[in-house]
DNA sequence: TGTACATCAGTGAACGCGCGTTCACTGATGTAC
DNA sequence: TGTACATCAGTGAACGCGCGTTCACTGATGTAC
């Protein structure tokens, strides 16, 4: 990379940044036209290069999608990890931050989120590369953060009342994903609801935590004074 | 329709059943090739008719997708309603049946489920017809069943501790959808988990209900003896 | 500091393909008399 | 019961399009000497 100023905008050859720009273009297109209604050609057009250019950086269309998933999982894991922050200052407050971070990621990167999690019914065949990304180390790391949080919460319980950690982590995950999937993706089924996704998820988790037994009694009020 | 036997297999003209057969073919293709990786032409081929034939029954590709969503919501609502069965014999047992019915539908009709709920990021533009289906009377009816269940459960609480019904219904919905979306769609992120979707959802809902305060104390055991 | 050259990252034209959709058509069905 | 006819539900050929991908190419960059 040269140091003659940051104005390499529209330099002819050697874009310098193409790979990242293509990923960004693809995410934008996916956000607008749907998880699999995007085309490599159009992404190239948006990036201002010829339709053949992407092949210098990705083996094929699928590889680009897989990279969106992979890098998405990486940022996702980093976000969750930062929000959880090892359960500091308290497991409960960190847990709330974790839930909000989950929703924030889904809102800020809906395209990444869709490729990461709506892959099942959207590209069963043909999408082997994406499947691989879904079981990548980064994806694993993201789930591990949830599991750490579950562990910290359960540690507050007497051993005889502890459900399996993995199960609790899955519960947290399904609640978060359920809210993100139903309420954040544009045009989703639940547009008319007057509550923010955050409000729904937080109240849901409070009730769940109370059921787990990790909330002091004082929280009754929080749950039931939300609305008439 | 003629009564000369039910063997109208491969009659030349006048298929008689084409609309339904096309929908079925489309569902099969969606299940195999992804929610929006299906083509009208291929569905026609699968149904054994020319690529122009579908246009006698659907204005365009989008209209067929919308009909999958609409009729999907109808069967979905019917299933949930039957399972809930007005809370008989007890709200709690009916509630469990409701959750199982939700997962059963998602498993038996993954294509319908995907079109109904994964529409957000998959066809924002272009999918107006599907969006319309998502706010159809049938979709409304499905959500109403969840709301009825929420109402029946909350009725067991003293009025001062009742959270808003709509909120509880949304909690139920996000839990169910979260499990269905993450665990049932083939090739989804959570294949390696040794638990069935039903086990995950049921345990999750038990904890949630306990947090709500509608479970008698006896259920502690149910939650924590599932696994070591 | 200057030149030769390998490598890298683009171009642009071309391909074959399957798709959505249209069109004029035609065979089968059902109804009126 | 038989014939005439409107309507319905298909056909099959054709179209224009955008896509994914390939290919031989070329301009820019970085390195060896």
Image (cartoon, coloured by chain):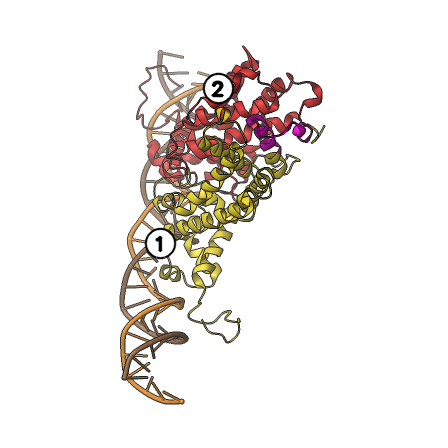
Chain colours: A yellow, B red, C orange, D brown
Is residue A8 visible in the rendered image? The answer is yes
The alpha-carbon separation of the residues under discs 1 and 2 comes to 50 Å
Q: Which sits in the foreground, A23 or A213?
A: A213
Q: Which sits in the foreground, D10 or D26?
A: D26
Task: Indicate yes or no whether the magenta region holds residue A215.
Answer: yes
Residue identifier under label 1: A60
Q: Which sits in the foreground, A162 or B63?
A: A162
- Label annotation for residue B222: 2
From the top left corner, tell me how far across and down residue D15 is, in percent: 39, 51
- Label annotation for residue A117: none
Q: Which residue is painted at 52% across and 45% down in the image?
A: A80
**Left or right for D32, reference A51:** left
Residue neighbourhood size for the residue with mark 2, other residues' Cα within 10 Å, grouped as few (<14), some (14–19), many (≥20): few
Q: Disc 2 is attached to a residue of which chain? A: B
Q: What is the quadrant of the N terminus of chain B in the image? A: top left
Main secondary structure along the magenta-highlighted residues = helix
What's drawn in magenta, residue-wise? A203-222
Q: Nearer the viewer, mark 1 or mark 2?
A: 2
Q: Secondary structure at mark 2?
A: helix
- Residue B149 in the image: above or below residue A148: above
Q: Disc 1 is attached to a residue of which chain? A: A
Is residue B68 visible in the rendered image? The answer is no
Instruction: Say whether marks 1 and 2 touch (CB < 8 Å).
Output: no
Residue neighbourhood size for the residue with mark 1, other residues' Cα within 10 Å, grouped as few (<14), some (14–19), many (≥20): few
- Residue A157 in the image: above or below residue A60: above
From the top left corner, tell me how far across and down residue B31 is, in percent: 39, 34
């Amino acid at each position: 990379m040269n140091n003659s100023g940051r104005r390499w905008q529209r330099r002819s050859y050697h874009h310098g940044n193409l790979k990242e720009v293509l990923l960004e273009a693809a995410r934008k297109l996916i956000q607008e036209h749907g998880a699999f209604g995007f085309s490599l050609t159009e992404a190239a057009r948006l990036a201002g290069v010829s339709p053949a250019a992407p092949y210098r950086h990705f083996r094929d269309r699928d590889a680009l999608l897989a990279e969106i998933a992979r890098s998405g999982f990486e940022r996702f894991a980093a976000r969750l990890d930062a929000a959880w922050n090892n359960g500091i200052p308290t497991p409960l407050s960190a847990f709330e931050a974790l839930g909000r971070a989950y929703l924030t990621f889904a809102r800020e990167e809906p395209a990444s989120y869709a490729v990461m999690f709506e892959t099942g019914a959207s590209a069963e065949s043909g999408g082997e590369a994406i499947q691989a990304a879904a079981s990548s180390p980064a994806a694993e790391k993201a789930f591990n953060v949830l599991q750490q949080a579950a562990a910290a919460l359960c540690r507050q319980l007497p051993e005889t009342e502890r459900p399996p950690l993995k199960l609790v982590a899955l519960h947290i995950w399904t609640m978060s994903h359920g809210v993100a999937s139903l309420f954040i993706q544009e045009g989703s089924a639940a547009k008319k609801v007057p509550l923010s996704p955050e409000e729904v998820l937080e109240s849901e988790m409070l009730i769940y935590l109370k059921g787990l037994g990790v909330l002091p009694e004082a929280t009754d009020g929080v749950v039931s004074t939300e609305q008439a």
